[in-house]
Image (cartoon, grey):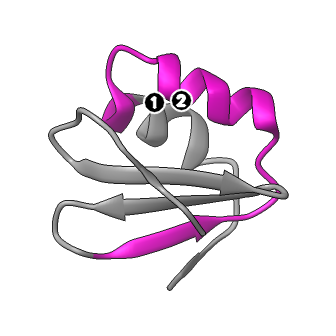
Amino acid sequence: MRRRPVNSSSVRSVGWSDGTLELEYLNGYVYQYLDVPQPTYAALLAAPSIGAYVNKHIKPYYEFRER
């Protein structure tokens, strides 16, 4: 999946395709969050803090797998 770099103190890059949100963290780990709607991805990109958005709106609600 193609990811785009983001300005964040914890996330290096993000990508979204067919409901899968992929996050690459600064520590090198990559996680895929499943069944994430496109508007949620758009809101993530527009958020003033990517890390805070992930912690509040992604992690509690979406199943994930490490890639």
User: How far across and down, in percent of the image, does residue 31 sit?
Assistant: 48, 71
In the rendered structure, which disc, 2 or 1, sits on the residue that comes first in sequence? 2
* Residue 53: image tag: 1
* Residue 43: image tag: none
Circle 1 residues within 10 Å: few <14, some 14–19, many ≥20? some
User: How far across and down, in percent of the image, does residue 58 sit?
Assistant: 58, 44
What residue sits 70% from the left and 31% below the top?
Answer: 40
Q: Is residue 20 above or below residue 38?
A: below
Q: Is residue 9 above or below residue 28?
A: above
User: How far across and down, in percent of the image, does residue 18 sit?
Assistant: 84, 58
Q: What's the residue type where badge 1 is placed?
A: Tyr
| Between 5 and 57, the one nearer to me in the picture | 5
- The residue that label 2 is drawn on is 44
Residue 9 lies left or right of residue 7; in this view the side is: left
What residue sits 29% from the left and 49% below the top?
Answer: 11
Q: Quadrant of the N terminus?
A: bottom right
Q: Are marks 2 and 1 in contact (CB under 8 Å)?
A: yes
- Please tell me in which quadrant of the rendered image residue 7 appears: top left
| Between 5 and 22, the one nearer to me in the picture | 5
Please say whether residue 10 is one of the residues in the magenta stretch.
no
Residue 23 lies left or right of residue 44; in this view the side is: left
Q: What's the residue type where badge 2 is placed?
A: Leu
